[in-house]
Image: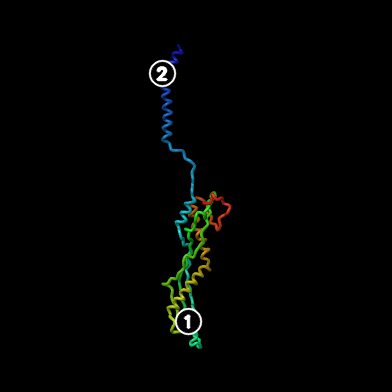
Amino acid sequence: MVLIHILRFILRWLPWALAMVAVYFLVQKTSAWFSPEPAGPETVVTHNIVLEEIESLGKMELVRYNFKEITELNEKNKPYLGFFDIPDSKVVVISHGEAVGCIDLSKIKKRDIIEKGDTVMVRLPEPELCYYKLDMENTRIYSIEKQVYFKQESDLAQKALKLAEREMKEAALRSGILPQTRKNAETMLKPLLEKISGKTVLFVDQLPDNIPINERR
């Protein structure tokens, strides 16, 4: 008699139990459909970003030297009639001008950048003297002594101005404009590239030869 009551109890509640199990699994399956995909391994690529940022800067002017010079040009005159000496023709120019140093960052290629762990090594192009020029508004011909009538004052003045411009170029190079350009490039680019890449940036003259080929970008 007891067995019959137990069977009746099981038969009465079994459909409800099966229904509840079915609902549970259905809810679990539905939740899985709408839940976001599990995150895969994070991939961080910084090399191309660094290269593109450098290239976008192009030719970067980094140093400007301002000059004020006094240039004297002496030009010998031939003896008059082959016998009489004639003093030299003279021009004095007081010139103002500038010379600018730059680095052409568009010359940097993928082979010039290497990533190694948390470090990015960059080989910069050689610094250049971008341009040098006289400020003609503030440049003056101080005096001209041509000594002979057949000489043109304008020709003497042009020669003196070209000499002043050439002297300004040489003065800029002697003053170390190219090393200063390189130093300023590193100072300005380092924080920028480190922020972009999230890595330590080192500027090198020569990339190491022991870097595997697959790590050279």
**Quarter of the rendering occupied by the N terminus:** top left
Scheme of colours in the image: rainbow
- Classify 171 as above or below 40: below
- Classify 87 as above or below 192: below
* Residue in the image at 42% along x and 78% along y: 154
Residue sitting nearer the eye, 104 or 25? 104
Of all residues shown, which one is farthest toward the top? 1
Which amino acid, mark 1?
Answer: Ser
Q: Disc 2 marks which residue?
A: 12
Q: Quadrant of residue 6?
A: top left
* Residue in the image at 46% along x and 79% along y: 91
Q: Which element is circle 1 on?
A: strand
Residue sitting nearer the eye, 181 or 46? 46
Residue sitting nearer the eye, 159 or 164? 159
Foreground mark, 2 or 1, reads 1
Which amino acid, mark 2?
Answer: Arg
Q: Disc 1 marks which residue?
A: 89
